[in-house]
Amino acid sequence: MTDITELTATELVRSYRRKDLSPVDVTKAVLTRIDSCNDAVNAFCVIDDNRALADAAQSESRWAKGEPCGLVDGVPTTIKDVVLTKGWPTLRGSRTTNPDQPWDVDAPCTARLRESGAVLLGKTTTPEFGWKGVTDNLVSGITRNPWNTDRTPGGSSGGAATAAALGMGALHIGTDGGGSIRIPSAFTGVFGHKPSFGRVPAWPGSAFGTLSHVGPLTRTVTDAALMLNVISKPDARDWTALPYIKRDYCVGLDDGVAGLRIAYSPSLGYIDVDPEIAALVEAAATVMRDLGATVEEIDPDFDDPAETFRQHWFGAAGKLVESFTPEEQALLDPGLREVAAMGSAITFGEFMDAMEARNQLGETMSRFHETYDLLLTPTMPIPAFKAGQEVPDPNKQPRWTVWTPFTFPFNLTQQPVSSAPCGFTSDGMPAGLQIIGPKHADALVLRAARAYESVCPFRMPAQPNVQHR
């Protein structure tokens, strides 16, 4: 029999409706799973058994009456620790945050999940303020990859991805300002979707401004679509949000890719990719061709936007750190202080040049999608590396933006992007296929990901692969 913790949100809701399972039994099983796995990987910074079981009991009562309050009633769910959650501190992985204060407000996505009956289990780990592409901080320590605990799960939503991979909840909220949903999705072998900017309301605004998106990490594409149905509902607190479109992202999910014109770029024209990763992604592109899409190998016509991204990201970090007192700054991650110092040195003229470069990149991709429905690339050019490091080789690579070249361009352009698992390297580490669509085409991106998943099902770890350190 399938372990309860392996069931998807979609399967759980179906089982509740048929009264085959109860939310309380499911929540108990998931909490037991967390108890057995979390010490090895450190995915959670808050676990609240009592509250989760109380939520599950209320859900069970609703299902017994045949009156679920929403699409995910009774589904075990986690929230990343940069997203406000009523009743729990949101430390953002930082010693500068005082936990002893009222925590009486939900962020929009938390509120929508709660209104829909989700059972909130706890909060998942993040680097301090989500500033880098791996997950460790000075409050809760190092988060580790379930496929090999000596490796990083990536970040900054590394706790959420690790929890998803190990069945420690079915639905997981992540954020993505430069790849923070897609990097850990690729490194841990789960599915992640960065929605079009504004599709999921966010409040308070991210320190990293209009680069940052809120989205789902799950074990299946269908669960991500189901979760998007919930968290994309409107919230007046986010004035940058897109107009709400009442649609079901699960409808049409299995329509396939036949007839689509898809561009495949193995390197974006300038990126060195690990040969095993390259081969896995090329095979995934071939699958799309076999499914009836026209797949053409071509690079979009833009140069490496790394400096443009750094001007935005490091500049925002500089503004964030300047808001702290000298005593608070001394408590910060040294790496965050370093990038903040670099950001503070950016002149107004340099930032305006970066804004113009961002505009040009957005126009380039908008025109590109006049010809191509989707763009495929690797999500990451490398497999997961040693945990506790910002970069694979600290002697050669200065900052995390060096090894994430496929993800951050599409934060600058605000496009919808998914990362789907597409196999494993020879040493057992996952690889990710990145699927990029034009702005607002979230349904199309999810549909393509589902088409790939339908013939190449995703595989999750049974237990953390613990390496002795």
Image (spheres, rainbow, N blue to C red):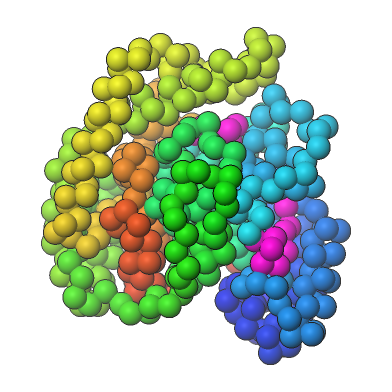
Residue 180 showing in the rendered view: no
Seen at 42% across and 44% down, the residue is 179
* Residue 65 to residue 331: above or below: below
Q: In the displayed structure, does residue 368 sit left or right of residue 65?
A: left
* Quadrant for the N terminus in the image: bottom right
Q: Which residues are magenta?
A: 113-132
Q: Residue at x 30, y 57 (%)?
A: 437
Residue 284 in sight in this render: yes
Q: Position of residue 22 (x, y in %)?
A: 77, 79
Residue 245 placed where, x, y %? Answer: 44, 64
Q: How many marks?
A: 0
Q: Is residue 66 above or below residue 201?
A: below
Q: Position of residue 405 (x, y in %)?
A: 32, 39
Please say whether residue 120 is one of the residues in the magenta stretch: yes
Considering depth in this image, is 28 or 200 the residue closer to the camera?
200
Q: Residue visible at 24% across and 30% down?
A: 357
The quadrant the C terminus occupies is top right
**Image position of 234 with respect to 16: above or below:** above
User: Looking at the image, which is closer to me, 266 or 12?
Assistant: 12
**Magenta segment: does it hold 379?**
no
* Residue 224 located left or right of residue 293: right
Q: Is residue 304 left or right of residue 323?
A: left
The percent coordinates of residue 332 (x first, y second) are 62, 21
